[in-house]
Amino acid sequence: MSLNNLFTYEIIAQETPNIKRNCSKCKTNTEFYCSEKFRVNANQKIVDIWLIYNCIHCEGTWNYPIFSRVNINKMDSMLIQKFMNNDKETIWYYAFQIKKLRKLCNDVNADIRYELRKEKLDSRSNEVTIILCYKHDFGLRIDKLIADIFGISRSKVNTLSQNGTILLNPNISMKSKVIDNLQITVKGDWF
């Protein structure tokens, strides 16, 4: 008889990714951090919206374009209000659009601090299924996360995956990036 316990692990980003680009004040390729502020500029019925980034050395700014030359009547009034009020959830949504940022910048440093909000594993169980909740995608690898959860090396994670002790649903590579609602099933009592 197999006992199966189900746990939910929430991966919570502690910071937004920094970007790297040329600073007009420093005259060098440097890192910028998200100021967590929008700039909204309206000219009659046309609006431009940027997310402001600051240079870590001189506080010079770079404006990440969110909307450019959009008719204000075609935008949701609640969304405009979020931009005007510097809504943190909206800021973080745009700050984690890493693919779009990479097109506009020299580099995006997605190696950020994160917290795992979890329940304590029950050691009496011989099979555990973990469901991952991942709100902000920052490119965290599955093998690194599993190693962090269980306090083992990545090579041990890969060995356990190859012998069928650790299974992923959907069935993707251990070297893939974490996705929301990924299920990790661990069989046996090795942990």
Image: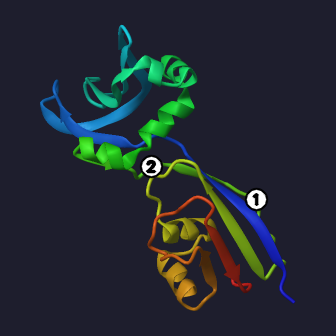
Residue in view at x 57 percent, y 85 percent: 160
| Label 2 SS | loop
Residue furthest to the right in view is 1
Tell me, yes or no, whether the two marked residues, 1 and 2, touch with CB atoms within 8 Å. no
Please give the residue where the numbered disc 1 appears in the rendered image.
119
Residue 112 image label: 2
Q: Earlier in the sequence, mark 1 or mark 2?
A: 2
Q: What is the residue that sits farthest to the top in this orientation? A: 44
Taking the image as shown, residue 81 lies to the left or right of residue 99, namely right
Front residue (pair 31, 75): 75
**Quarter of the rendering containing residue 101:** top left
Is residue 109 among what the camera can see? Answer: no
Horizontally, residue 185 falls left or right of residue 59, namely right
Name the residue: 25% across, 24% down. Answer: 58
Marker count (numbered): 2
- Amino acid bearing label 2: Ile
Q: Quadrant of the C terminus?
A: bottom right
User: Residue 164 location, x and y as percent?
Assistant: 61, 89
Question: Vertical placement of 156 versus 12: above or below?
Answer: below
Q: How much space separates mark 1 and mark 2, taking CA atoms?
A: 23 Å
- Residue nearest the viewer, comparing 57 with 181: 181
In the rendered structure, the answer to whether residue 188 lies left or right of residue 111 reads right
Q: Position of residue 129 (x, y in %)?
A: 72, 72
Residue type, numbered disc 1: Glu
Q: How is the image coloured?
A: rainbow
Residue at position x 54%, y 29% from top?
88
Q: Quadrant of the N terminus?
A: bottom right
| Of the pair 72 and 17, the residue shown nearer to us | 72
Q: Nearer the viewer, residue 139 or 112?
A: 139
| 45 horizontally vs 9: left or right | left
Q: Does residue 122 sit above or below 138 in this rendering? A: below
Image disc number at residue 171: none
